Image (spheres, grey):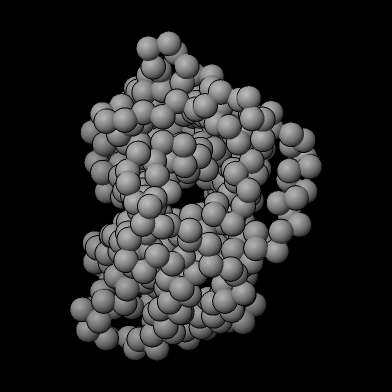
Amino acid sequence: MNPSAAKPTTFSGRRRWILFWAISVLFGLSMFYRSAIAVITTDLMRDVPMDLGALGFVSAAFFYSYALFQIPSGVLLDRFSPVRVMTAFFLTALAGVVLFAVAESWAVMVLGRLLTGAGMACGFIGALKILSMQFSPNRFATLSGIVVSVGNAGIVFATTPLVLWTQGLGWRTTFLLVGLFHLAVTMSFVLAFRDERGAGQGAPAPETAGGGDALGGLRMVLKDGQVWLISLAAFIRYGVLAAVQGLWAGPYLMDVMGYSPVTAGNLLFLLTLGVIIGNPASGFLSDHVFRRRKGIMIVALAGYALTLAALAHVPIGAPLWLVALFFAAFGIFAGTGSLPYAHLKELTPPERAATALTVLNFSAVVGAGVFMQGLGLLIKALFPASTVSHESFRVMFLVCTGAMLAGVVLYAFTRESLTVRVAEGRER
């Protein structure tokens, strides 16, 4: 750390909260972009010549570049002014959104999605960096939980609302309007960082000034066993959530349980609502009630495993209220995604915090891809004649249960990190 580095601009009052909501909404846009393809596939294939393989590439392109740019974005956030880094990334994403909206070929769509994924790669970790600069430590988990909840609200907007918008305006116009909104929020983010002298534009946090050797910092992070334990647990926690919420819940509810698309959508909404509630609630409990990270995560992961085990044993024809209860519980127990970030931030030296958090985020994103594809390959191998059956999904949920129990074991070996004291309770 460079002791002579300028102190970062810390705002109070209205400007700080404008900044908070701007980064929250930008993360919500990131979640919207990653989920938006699912409900407009028919429109895309009608307007742009492509087969299902190309369509899959268009959808996955966001995740490829998002994962690829996780660690580089974290290194940049640790070395340079977060506002400059994040603004450059968000504008890159905006270019990708516009390119996607005007594309006449699936290859150009892929390029647009690659730019969007790369540009949104620093959204969540950058938000955590800003929170650590602008708010007191004993509010970090609560506020980061709200950021995650706003992100999950972005997933909600990528479902029925997006269908209605595309029916009324067309998918191209809809994405151009979303891009305009993206630009407006990015500008509010930039303006919130400006003070009377413009110091907020370029003053890095003390821990980022000087920066040191970026690759050396990454090597130090990767040598830390706590990083691996928390990251592997996140690989499992988010991997299962993304696989069920984003892919496998649909065929399970409609093809196995026999529910209508509307009922299946309502049950998925309950799951998402549980995640939206769970993140700020777990953050508040961690920050202000129990003042623990590790213990709350272990309880949540254990509850997550029990819920998956319960779903594995739900019979066909079970009361709808029971399935709804399990899906809501699934979301609430899975909705602790912000706590590992708070936990790891507190275990990592400040000058390497963003790098460590991007390793964690990278693990979670890779987990989503592995569980989405891996569960499908497993079921296809075990049940080649009946991939979509009650028995195949029972096995799928039991495999996820076992994985989640492994996550409990991993987290049991982490160190408690929370250092909140009564003296730190005053709000900046």
Residue at 40% x, 17% y is: 194
Q: Quadrant of residue 117?
A: top right
Question: Seen from this angle, which residue lies furthest front?
Answer: 423
Which residue, as the protein is rendered here, is positioned at the far top? 197
Tell me residue 135's x, y (percent): 39, 41
Residue 320: percent from the left, percent from the top?
22, 78
Give the total number of marks visible in the rendering: 0
Residue visible at 48% across and 58% down? 419
For the C terminus, give its image quadrant: top left
Relative depth, front residue between 136 and 267 = 136
The N terminus is located in which quarter?
top right
Q: Is residue 187 visible?
A: no
**Left or right of 275, for residue 48:** right
Q: Looking at the image, is 112 positioned above or below residue 141?
A: above
Q: Is residue 10 left or right of residue 236?
A: left
Q: Is residue 62 above or below residue 261?
A: above
**Could you tell me which residue is drawn at 34 percent across and 88 percent down?**
315
Q: Nearer the viewer, residue 248 or 294?
A: 294
The answer to which of 402 and 201 lies nearer the viewer is 201
Whether residue 196 is visible, yes or no, is yes
Q: Which quadrant of the figure has residue 372?
A: bottom right
Query: Looking at the image, which is closer to me, 417 or 398?
Result: 417
Residue sitting at x 26%, y 29%: 14
Q: Is residue 132 above or below residue 268?
A: above
- 8 left or right of 249 in image: right
Residue 354 to residue 322: above or below: above
